[in-house]
Amino acid sequence: MKTSHFYRKSIKRWLFILSILLLVCFAFGIFVYAQSAEQTEINKSIQLINPRPVFSLRLRLGLERGDSTSYVPGERMALAFESSKDAYVTIYQYDPEGRVKIIFPNQSNPHDFVQGEHLYQVEGLILPLDSGFGPGYIQAFATIRPLLMVRDNRYPDILAQEFPVISFSLGDFTINLRNLLHQQPLENWVSSNILEYQVVQPYYASEKVGSVMAISFPRGAEVYLDNEYYGISPKRIADIQTGQHLLEFVMPGYEIWSKTVTVSSNLTTQMEADLVPVEAYGEISLTCDQPNALIFIDGIEYGKTTAPKGTFIISDITEGYHELTVMKPGSKEYRTWTQTVKVLGGETLPIYVSLSKSNF
């Protein structure tokens, strides 16, 4: 009897555990189905297809790492596209938060007209560090005439910034774009395939690593971490041991920027550096046809000219534009000579001054 009672209790316990597992699996299945259905609905809502396209006009997109690829915030994306005919191409990115960006044309490629059967690259696209997680989409349109949003009067300064956000509502944007396309003859436009990607949280093999997003202004500086070269700014450096590290930016014509950065576990630390131009100095070699004339640079007196046609050297002048003035003090016989000159670092600027006589 005791054995039978123990057996029944065990069966009940296992049935209870099994029912819990079934409920969890069912809930997970519902969640996955809902997520899949939601993504399918988004795809349907943004997919603008020409019902009767001209088959000679086709447009294809491709991500460097393939479709349905995962990216983490701060990571670089690269894609390529090709039109079968000469056309005007506009490429839009829809991020996980519903924002719409124009990623082509852009500051690096400001012209939307492309040649047929020519592969174009879109580079320099970096997912913002504050990007939300979830699916994102990219699609493009090729038109025979320039008519899409990039030339719309509502966006007069569209290329004033790289990859600008032109809408914070994907639904409203899609409606406006659909209305715009429906006003055009069907033979004048075609849409591309839709690229889907996922923005995911960074995964680290160890909890004791983080990453650094190194950004310099201007861009293009060499990035060093603990004296090791990692690439060109902007640059994301991943899998860095937690703790303090020395970050440096090096760029010709600018002072070396260095700072200690603290890397935290499973976090991306963004470091921005405004590089300071290196101050350079040059000199002016001034020759004047009159002695004892006062010499001024930017209103500051530097001395007097020597004997006629003698040379007066002015050193340690900062590189750039300066106002040079030569005048005879207390004399109305000669006019004052003034001119804006450009001094280059490490060079001597020869100047000859002839003080003409005044008619008064």
Image: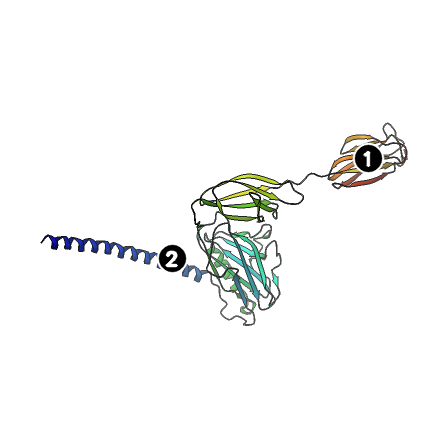
Mark 1: give few (<14), some (14-19) or many (20+) Cα within 10 Å. Answer: some
Instruction: Look at mark 1 in the image and give the residue it sits on.
Output: 313
Q: Where does the image place residue 351, in percent across and percent down from the top left?
A: 83, 39
Residue closest to the far top: 330
Residue closest to the far bottom: 55
Q: Secondary structure at mark 1?
A: strand
Instruction: Look at mark 2 in the image and give the residue it sits on.
Output: 35
Mark 2: give few (<14), some (14-19) or many (20+) Cα within 10 Å. Answer: few
Q: How many marks?
A: 2
Q: Quarter of the image for the C terminus: give it.
A: top right
User: Is 127 placed left or right of 354 in the picture?
Assistant: left
Q: How is the image coloured?
A: rainbow
User: Is 22 placed left or right of 55 in the picture?
Assistant: left
Q: Quarter of the image for the N terminus: give it.
A: bottom left
Q: Secondary structure at mark 2?
A: helix
Q: Quadrant of residue 271?
A: top right
Between disc 1 and disc 2, the foreground one is 1
Q: Where does the image place residue 295, in percent across and percent down from the top left?
A: 82, 32
Decide which of 344, 135 is in the foreground and name it.
Answer: 344
- Seen in the picture, residue 300 relative to 193 is either above or below; the reply is above
Q: Where does the image place residue 105, in percent across and percent down from the top left?
A: 59, 57
User: Is 74 placed left or right of 216 in the picture?
Assistant: left
Q: Quadrant of residue 355?
A: top right
- Name the amino acid type tagged 2: Gln
Question: Of label 1 and label 2, which has the lower sequence position?
Answer: 2
What is the number of the mark on residue 39?
none
Decide which of 201, 31 is in the foreground and name it.
Answer: 201
- Name the amino acid type tagged 1: Ile
- Seen in the picture, residue 169 relative to 224 is either above or below; the reply is below
- Seen in the picture, residue 344 relative to 328 is either above or below; the reply is below
Q: Where does the image place residue 227, in percent across and percent down from the top left?
A: 57, 43
Residue located at (56% from left, 67% from top):
188
